[in-house]
Image (cartoon, helix red, strand yellow):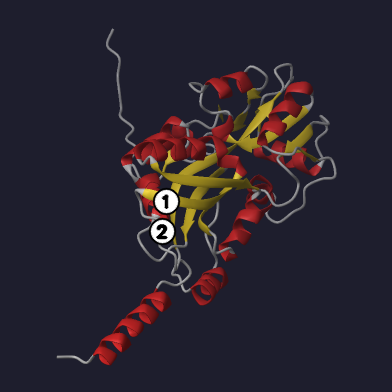
Amino acid sequence: MIPIKSWIYLLLAGIIFNSCGSGGNSNQTDDPDRGTIQISVDESFKPVIDSQIQVYESSHPQTKIIAHYKPEAECLRDFANDSIRLVIATRGYSKNEQDFIIDSMKTEPSKMTIAYDAIALIVNPQAADSMFTMPEVRDIVTGKSAKKLQPVFDGVHATSTVRFMIDSVLKGGQLGANVIAAQNSEGVIDYVAKNKSAVGFIGVSWVGNKEDTMQLSFLKKVRLAYLESTDKPGAYVQPVQANIYYRRYPMVRDLIYVLKENYNGLGHGFADFLTSQRGQLIFKRAYLMPAIMQFNVRQASLRT
């Protein structure tokens, strides 16, 4: 028989071990079917992530996912925020950020590309031009365009759209002084709708879904422009799924989640849902390109 004191020591040791081993999420008050968590999301993806949350919560009625929609740079700073379980943005963590999360939160983060998105160009319905080459796009955003078109972004600092343009389109160059910053993606749409010379840069999930009533109302105010195809000079394409999948559309980017949760909590449940068939179908219905679900393109012929 073990003495009472020994039982007490064993009990205390177990408590200490469990509290140390739980890392940055010591209060395990949630699991995939119940509880509340906070996540940080790039504002560019608000329409589709709202849909994902709505479906998940309807299937798991005891859960609550509170999404904070922000410019991407603020989302990336949330790698260091232990109250944010999941970050959804267009890049994952760096090696230094990974080491910081492990050292400070005692949590091994994970990341996964869950969909492919495109930056859409929108123009006023009365605009003279709705077809652009990438050199023309670069001239527009650096203020060198002879047509004096007015570029408008969802902010001039800290957004994923701005970062993509600087890193991937301008190759480290600077935006021109002519760039106008709207408060958010909806503000870009409103500005373009009121200005014939404006060219807006916006995530395609805001304007790509012609089955969504809100996006249909947006598309009555603006037009989706065409960019020159990457594989066929002189051909112009829009950011539809097939063009995103084959990278014919020249401005495609990844959508990535970063999960910071070292037990099977609600963060894991929602992340798994985003990669499941249902979650991937929601991305597809939002006119993003699912990254996990196989996309089949079939050859077809018509008989006359």
Could you tell me if residue 229 is visible in this image? Answer: no
Name the residue rendered at 32%, 88% in the picture. Answer: 9
Above or below, 69 relative to 127: below
Image height check: is 277 above or below 235?
below
Left or right relative to 66: residue 23: left
The residue under label 1 is which amino acid type? Gly
Determine the secondary structure under disc 2: loop
**Residue at which label 1 appears:** 35
When the figure is inspected, residue 219 is found, relative to residue 113, above or below; the finding is: above
Q: Quadrant of residue 129?
A: top right
Under mark 2, the amino acid is: Thr
Tell me the crowding category of disc 2: few under 14, some 14 to 19, or many 20 or more residues within 10 angstroms, Cα based. few
Q: Determine the residue located farthest toward the top in the rendered image.
A: 304
Q: Residues within 10 Å of mark 1 (few under 14, many from 20)?
A: some
Any mark on residue 78, and which? none
Q: How many marks?
A: 2
Residue 46 drawn at (x, y percent): 56, 39
Q: Quadrant of residue 57?
A: top left
What percent of the width, then of the height, locates residue 248? 50, 37
Lateral position of residue 219 relative to residue 304, left or right: right
Q: Is residue 186 left or right of residue 252?
A: right
- Whether the residues at callouts 1 and 2 have beta carbons within 8 Å, the answer is yes
* Residue labelled with disc 2: 29
**Local secondary structure at mark 1:** strand
Quarter of the image where the C terminus is located: top left
Q: Position of residue 217 (x, y in %)?
A: 61, 19
Can residue 129 be seen in this snapshot? yes
